[in-house]
Amino acid sequence: MADRSDLGGKFETLVNTIMGVRGDNVAQQSVVDDRQPDWLAMATYITGTLAQMGLMLLALWGLQQLTQVWSGMPQVGCAISFFTLVAIRSRLFSPLNNARTRTTYSSVNRPGWAPPPLAFPIIWMGIGVLRVIASYLVWQVLGQTYWSWPLLIFMAHLAMGDTWNTIFTVEGRLGLAVPVVIVGPFMSAIAVSISYWQVVPLAGQLLLPMVLWLAVASALVISIWQLNGREPWYPMKLDDVV
């Protein structure tokens, strides 16, 4: 029994390391009671998302230019490496705090059907693999082109997902997290899947688990919001660190 427990602990550590999830809780701020809107925070989210999109698009453009001037560039290896990087650690391009922690999820009231915390990095690791394969197929069929609409939409999807993590996971804004998860990660996932499907049907099919999981995640975020005071769907001013 001890060996099995130790093995499970090592597996959890491995998954968290790959996905960049911190095992410890971090200090969070709580919203103030008077429900004052924090429009500066909203401006920060929008600016941060646009900045991340810009950096990721710049990376795509740079890779496209590099393929044209470097005849000996290992095309397949570079493509797989880049798609793996953005599929698992896209937050490296974000100016916002996108730390993956369990602080919010562990501290809020959750519905009985809510998955355990460890399920999230495992599921996202699997989705990450599917993202890499699907993106590679699209890149290959389009003539090994990085600068294409499907990949541009994919970069935008990743940026919106990272901003949602800042809002919910890092800052614990349960109200704003509801419309953002629907309009951002979920709707953009549908757009990515459709755009990939139009190029390579198999690529779009590979992303269906991502769409289904984000539908479940959206329902979970809504349920958590309902069980924890139904904050307004806008960012409220934060109080002292708790």
Image (cartoon, rainbow, N blue to C red):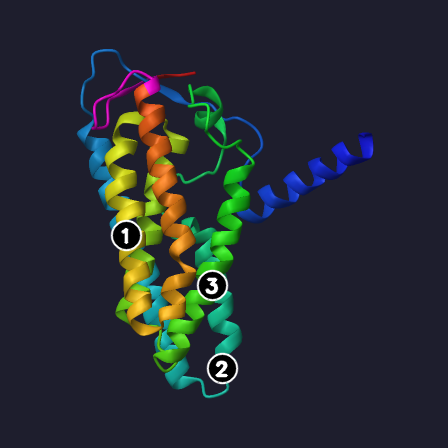
Residue of label 2: 73
- The location of residue 224, given as percent across then percent down, is 36, 25
Dot 3: element: helix
The stretch in magenta equals 227-239
**Label number found at residue 188:** 1
Placement of 64 over or under 156, stated as above or below: below
Q: Mark 2 is on which residue type? A: Met
Task: In the rendered view, tell whether residue 49 sits above or below residue 6.
Answer: below
| Percent x, y of residue 143 | 36, 82
Dot 1 lies on which element? helix
Q: What secondary structure is marked by label 2?
A: loop
In three-dimensional space, the C-alpha distance between marks 2 and 3, rounded to whole angstroms, equals 19 Å
Q: Please tell me which residue lies in front, 31 or 55.
A: 31
Marks 2, 3: nearer the viewer: 3
Q: CA distance from mark 2 to mark 1?
A: 32 Å
Quadrant hosting residue 61: bottom left
What's the magenta bit mostly, secondary-structure-wise?
loop
The residue at the point 30 percent across, 46 percent down is 186
Q: Which residue is mark 3?
A: 132
How far apart are the two marked residues, 1 and 3, measured between alpha carbons?
17 Å
Q: Residue at x 46, y 38 (%)?
A: 99
Please, is residue 89 above or below residue 144 in the view? above
Residue at 40%, 67% (x, y): give it.
203
> Do callouts 2 and 3 mark residues in contact (Cβ within 8 Å)?
no
* Marks 2 and 1, the one that precedes in the sequence: 2
Q: In the rendered image, which quarter contains the N terminus? A: top right
For badge 1, the amino acid type reads Ser
